[in-house]
Image (tube, helix red, strand yellow):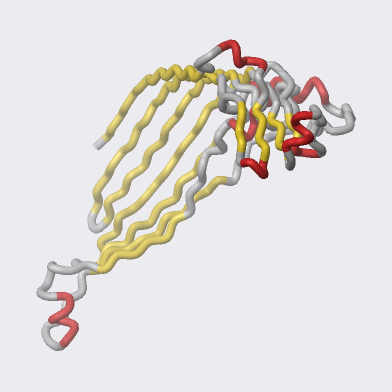
Amino acid sequence: VNDLRLSWRRAISDFPLKDPSNLDFPNITVRPLNLQLGPSSNLPQSGGDNVYQIFNTMSYIRGQHNFKFGGEFRRILTTSTFLARQRGDYYYNNLEDLILDNTPAGRDALRGVGNGTFTGNTSRYFFFGQDDWKVTPNLTLNLGLRYELATVPRATKDFLPFFAGVSVPGLDFENVESDKNNFAPRVGFAYAPVFRNGILRSIFGERGTSSIRGNFTVSYSDVFQNLLLFSKPPQLEQE
C-alpha cells in the first residue's frame, strides 16, 4: 500500500504597536517601585511563510512482519521582521537615576540595532523505516530508524561567507553547517500476558484483556529561527 500526500500552507502574522506614536518610546522599569513604562518590547513584529510538503509512505506485509518505509520533504520559504529591544530596555534600581536621566550600567541598558529582517528559507528532509514484528501471538516488537536533515537558513548561509576570516571585536563570524548525524532509533514492544490462575490472573484478567507496552526513542527538535535571528551577525543585529 502506498500513501502519497502533497500540501501547501501559507501563513501571515502581523503584530503592530497599537499606537504608532510610541515607536520611539523606550521600555523603562524601576525595580523598587515595580513600575513599568512603555509598550511591549516584543512589538512590532511581522512575518510570513509558505510551506510546500511532499510525503510518501509504503506498507508491506510479509509473514509475521509489517514493514513500513517513507520519507518527507518540506521547502519552507519564510521572512520575518523583528528587531529585539529596538526602542531600548532600561532597568533602574532607584527612581533618582531615572529622574536624573542616568543611563543604567551594564546589561540594565539594552537596545537593538539593525533592520530586523531575517530570511529563513530552508529545506527539511525526513526518512524512516520500521518493522512491526509479531514474534508470538501475544508479543510484538516495534523496530525502526529515522533520519532528519535541515539545511542552513538562507540569511545565515548567504551572509557569513562574505566575512570569512574577518576579525571584529564583539562579532563572531563562524561558519554554520547543517547537522548531518540526526539518526533516531525506535524500539518498542507490546505484550499481552496470559495467566491461567493465581493472583496475576486476577490482576491482568483473561487472555486479550490486558497489555504491557514499553518503548525507547530518540527525537530531534527544530531550532526555531529566533535563535538565528538574534545571533551575530547575520543581520548585523546587536544589543
Which quadrant of the figure has residue 50?
A: top left
Q: Nearer the viewer, residue 168 or 154?
A: 168
Counting labels gives 0
Left or right: residue 84 compared with residue 166: left
Q: Residue furthest bottom?
A: 198
Q: Say which residue appears at 75% left-offset and 25% top-offset.
A: 160
Q: Position of residue 149 (x, y in %)?
A: 54, 37
Q: Say which residue appears at 32% left-offset and 63% top-offset.
A: 189
Q: Position of residue 131 (x, y in %)?
A: 34, 53
Q: Position of residue 197 (x, y in %)?
A: 12, 86
Q: Position of residue 185 (x, y in %)?
A: 46, 54
Q: Tell me, yes or no, if residue 135 can be seen here.
A: no
Left or right: residue 136 compared with residue 224: left
Which quadrant of the figure has residue 102?
A: top right
Q: Tell me, yes or no, if residue 171 can be seen here.
A: yes
Q: Nearer the viewer, residue 87 or 101?
A: 101
Q: Say which residue appears at 71% left-offset and 21% top-offset.
A: 235
Q: Check the picture and name the quadrant holding the C terminus.
A: top right
Q: Nearer the viewer, residue 215 or 181?
A: 215
| In the rendered image, the vertical position of residue 81 relative to residue 42, given as above or below | above
Which quadrant of the figure has residue 65?
A: bottom left
Q: Nearer the viewer, residue 93 or 200?
A: 93
Q: Say which residue appears at 55% left-offset and 35% top-offset.
A: 224
